[in-house]
């Protein structure tokens, strides 16, 4: 298993860029390992602190298991709102079941002051449940219910739960265990529930969709959710048709534009560097990017591709690179908590099918973006202006788009500049306050 060198030092390290902090060291070109890491100290009991508002996020995966867009969303939102109001405190209920094989390095409790993390499990029922899920890709209903019940009772015993004002569930896809966990906690403590739908279309989870119209999920949205947040106009339309217009909110994802901007930072852009940032998992089609790059390399031999991320497809993708004889031109940098230096030193960003947040970050970093004409990507990108849209799963068309931007520096710079301007509409300073108002309205009601 591939980890960055930060993994063994602490189970959570995340670079947090404060609104006004653009470190002089960072401007001097030092990488993320040199400065600015926020260390979250492990504690068996959290110290007593007084906060006016406590928000509890509920999401099944977190660093070091995952540090993709959704995890960065939770961290970025929590830190920004706390920084603007230190009387706010954020908790995170997440899982440790899938980390059991990684040994005791995975801490159960961690505390950054503004974000307190509690990892549920492992327990024997959950481990058996995960064996079924990972080997047979299905679950026994009895085991699933027993696992959820055990995790729920553990969460209820966490003393921080008694002070929570709002529960915030993230993501509704095929595995509903932690969505149900949020519902149960909301009911138990009689506190309001926010559900954020981090997906761009309604459909089968096997294709990356959200099964919102299933009876089970419809009931949760109807009876338990006090507010539903979506970044997709298409999903918002579905929610309205389902009768949830009054509790549904269209709020885009966000990026800290000041933190990701490369202005004033020494970069090594050469006009030949391509980067892709995403989880390396089935369904995101990173193999299409690699195959497209093989065609690009045949035309522009000096071009390089850097792949940032980790997941189940890490080794298969490395084998594909070897098969295509691209080992000298394609590099894998593994799981990273801070992707900015990789963006700053690249020229073109290639998005995956679900690379919404990574695309916003690439825009803010001043890269020309190429993305699939799919889902939320086709909603936010104006083809030929702030990005290039290509048909999904078409390495030939993707290769043509990459070669076009590599050869035409003026077009590349124009698209990058327009993307940087587009990112301003998604700045965290504009977006996070809207979520905070939802928290306030639910508390007061």
Image (cartoon, helix red, strand yellow):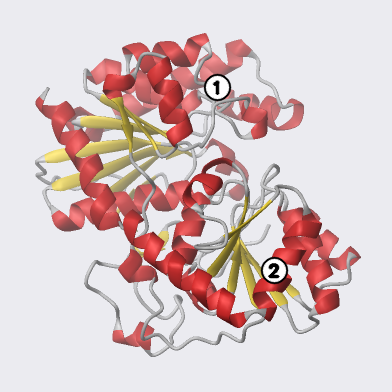
In the picture, measured across the screen, residue 374 lies left or right of residue 321, that is left
Q: Earlier in the sequence, mark 1 or mark 2?
A: 1
> In the rendered image, which residue does mark 2 sit on?
402
Quarter placement of the N terminus: bottom right
Residue 358 is situated, as x and y percent measured from the top left of the image, at: 50, 57
In the picture, measured across the screen, residue 133 lies left or right of residue 45, that is right
Seen from the viewer's position, the closer of residues 4 and 83 is 83
Write down the quadrant of residue 400 in the picture. bottom right
Crowding near the residue tagged with mark 1, few <14, some 14–19, many ≥20 C-alpha atoms within 10 Å: some
Is residue 366 in sight in this rendering? Answer: no
Does the residue at mark 1 contact the one at mark 2 (Cβ under 8 Å)? no
Seen from the viewer's position, the closer of residues 111 and 200 is 200
Quarter placement of the C terminus: top left
Is residue 387 in sight in this rendering? Answer: yes
- The disc label shown at residue 211, or none: 1
Residue 334 is situated, as x and y percent measured from the top left of the image, at: 62, 64
Crowding near the residue tagged with mark 2, few <14, some 14–19, many ≥20 C-alpha atoms within 10 Å: many
Seen from the viewer's position, the closer of residues 391 and 84 is 391
Residue at x 69% of width, y 22% of height: 138
* Vertical side of 68 occupied by 169: above or below: above
Residue at x 51% of width, y 55% of height: 382
Q: For the residues carrying marks 1 and 2, which lies nearer the camera in this image?
A: 2
Helix, strand or loop at label 1? It is loop
Residue 111 is situated, as x and y percent measured from the top left of the image, at: 29, 52
* Vertical side of 443 occupied by 342: above or below: below
Helix, strand or loop at label 2? It is helix
Residue 50 is situated, as x and y percent measured from the top left of the image, at: 9, 44
In the picture, measured across the screen, residue 280 lies left or right of residue 6, that is right
Write down the quadrant of residue 36 in the picture. bottom left
Give the distance between the C-alpha atoms of the residues marked 1 and 2, in whole angstroms: 34 Å
Residue at x 18% of width, y 48% of height: 47
């Amino acid at each position: 298993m591939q980890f960055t060198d930060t993994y063994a030092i602490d189970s959570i390290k995340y670079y947090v860029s404060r609104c006004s902090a653009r470190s002089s060291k960072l401007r001097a070109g030092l990488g993320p390992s040199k400065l600015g890491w926020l260390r979250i100290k492990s504690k068996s009991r959290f110290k007593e602190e007084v906060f006016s508002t406590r928000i509890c996020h509920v999401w099944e995966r977190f660093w070091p298991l995952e540090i993709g867009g959704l995890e960065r969303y939770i961290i970025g939102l929590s830190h920004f709102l706390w920084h603007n109001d230190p009387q706010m405190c954020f908790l995170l209920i997440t899982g440790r079941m899938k980390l059991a094989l990684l040994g005791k390095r995975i801490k159960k409790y961690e505390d950054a002051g503004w974000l307190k993390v509690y990892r549920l499990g492992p327990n024997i029922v959950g481990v058996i449940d995960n064996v079924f899920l990972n080997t047979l890709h299905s679950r026994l209903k009895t085991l699933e219910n027993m696992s959820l019940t055990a995790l729920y009772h553990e969460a209820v015993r966490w003393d921080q739960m008694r002070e929570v004002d709002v529960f915030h569930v993230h993501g509704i896809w095929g595995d509903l265990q932690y969505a149900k966990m949020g519902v149960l906690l909301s009911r138990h403590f009689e506190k309001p529930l926010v559900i954020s739908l981090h997906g761009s279309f309604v459909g089968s989870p096997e294709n990356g969709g959200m099964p919102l119209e299933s009876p089970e999920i419809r009931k949760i949205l109807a009876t338990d959710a006090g507010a539903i947040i979506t970044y997709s106009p298409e999903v918002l339309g579905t929610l309205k048709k389902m009768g949830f217009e009054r509790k549904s909110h269209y709020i885009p994802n966000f990026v800290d534009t000041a933190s990701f901007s490369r202005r004033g930072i020494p970069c090594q852009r050469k006009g030949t560097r391509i980067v892709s940032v995403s989880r390396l998992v089935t369904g995101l089609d990173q193999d299409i990017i690699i195959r497209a790059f093989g065609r690009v390399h045949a035309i522009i031999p000096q071009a390089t591709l850097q792949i940032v991320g980790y997941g189940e497809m890490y080794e298969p993708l490395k084998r594909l690179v070897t098969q295509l004889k691209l080992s000298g031109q394609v590099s894998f940098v593994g799981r990273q908590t801070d992707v900015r230096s990789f963006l700053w030193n690249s020229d073109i960003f290639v998005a995956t099918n679900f690379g919404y947040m990574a695309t916003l970050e690439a825009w803010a970093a001043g890269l020309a973006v190429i993305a699939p004409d799919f889902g939320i990507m086709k909603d936010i990108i104006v083809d030929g202006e702030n990005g290039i849209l290509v048909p999904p799963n078409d390495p030939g068309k993707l290769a043509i788009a990459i070669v076009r931007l590599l050869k035409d520096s003026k077009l590349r710079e124009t698209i990058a500049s327009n993307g940087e301007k587009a990112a301003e509409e998604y700045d965290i300073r504009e977006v996070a306050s809207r979520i905070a108002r939802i928290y306030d309205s639910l508390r007061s009601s």
